[in-house]
Image (cartoon, grey):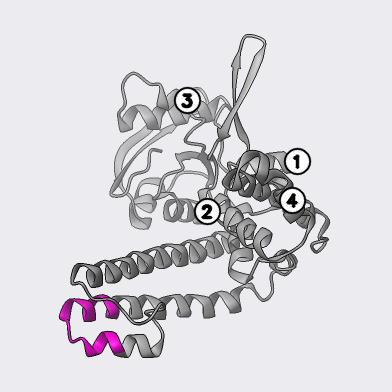
Amino acid sequence: MDVHKGFSHAIVMTETGEVLKEGRIETSSEGMKGFFQGLPPSRIAMESTRAWEPVYEALTELGHDVRLSHPMKTKAIAYAKVKTDKVDARTLADLLRANLLPQSYVPPKEIRNLRNICRERSHIVGDRTRWKNRLRAELGRRGIKPPFKNLYNRDAKSWLKSLKIRKLDRILSFIEFLDFKVQEIDQHLHEYIKSIPEIKILTTIPGVGAYSAAVIYSEIGEIERFPTSEKLCAYAGLVPSTHQSGSHAYHGRITKEGSRYLRWILVECAQIHVAKFDTRVTRFHNRLKYRVGKQKAVVASARKLCKIIFWMLTCKEGFKG
């Protein structure tokens, strides 16, 4: 099945490739039930798109075995000469029949819920940062120099409101609303993560707070799916790219494949860690930064932290500096 936001294309095949049913269906629980109701429990392949999760939930509830295809590895679709929804759905079905479908990991529902909460917070904080930048830009455009470094404490907000500039008031109200939403999510997260032992383990790392630990845990999922620490680093996109030419291998920048949220939080945590704490990761960073530069040293430290996290979660042990 090829899933899109509004409508999806589905095709039902037998093991021998005979088409039993095919059609365009609404991407909703009702649409899925209408098309798949009455079919015996089946294996269903679908692409890992933005709209996959509610479709996955609906089909799983109907008793089907749903497989999520890895978008980058499903080369048969990427290199197809004719790129239509119909071709994609049929190709997915053929790959599934032949047991050649490259699958994406689907974490348990509890981890998916936590991941969605953490990502929502990240998006809201990003929106808030953009509004804060707009506020400073608007002050600069009007030639107003604020008497405060922090524009968001009580005194600074009172000063901003005393200017009686409607546009500034609107921007400030957006920022205050987003502050409230972040606090709301943080309260929800606090209750949600209290009973998760992996998050307690991760918060033993200096510089890793509850939210950062929740992001790391929810993006990794079940640590058992990674056979080695290198595989986890590759999933985080923190391994160097490799180009082969004849008998020579050349290493370039990090791949940036996998979870961008995991990569982002690991780099953020590494920056805080090496700036404030004296640990083996910090000493590694300090040795490296004079040779490769500060930014590359931070990324290398994030990779080292990622390897440590692999062993912490695998062995269920706290951080040892």
Mark 3: secondary structure: helix
- On screen, residue 138 versus residue 3, left or right, reads left
Residue 254, position as x, y percentages in the image:
57, 37
* Distance between the alpha carbons at the discs numbered 4 and 2: 17 Å
Picture quarter with the N terminus: top left
Q: Amino acid at mark 4?
A: Phe
Residue drawn at (48%, 75%) of the image: 185
Picture quarter with the C terminus: bottom right
Mark 2: secondary structure: helix
Toward the viewer: 312 or 226?
312
Specify the quadrant of the image occupied by residue 18. top left
Toward the viewer: 5 or 257?
257
- On screen, residue 161 versus residue 317, left or right, reads left
* Distance between the alpha carbons at the discs numbered 1 and 3: 26 Å
> Label 2 belongs to which residue?
261
* Distance between the alpha carbons at the discs numbered 4 and 1: 8 Å
Tag 4–tag 1 contact (CB < 8 Å): yes
Residue 290, position as x, y percentages in the image:
67, 44
Q: Which mark is residue 75?
A: 3
| Magenta segment boundaries in residue numbering | 159-173
Q: Amino acid at mark 3?
A: Lys
Mark 1: secondary structure: loop
Give the mark nearer the N terminus: 1 vs 2: 1
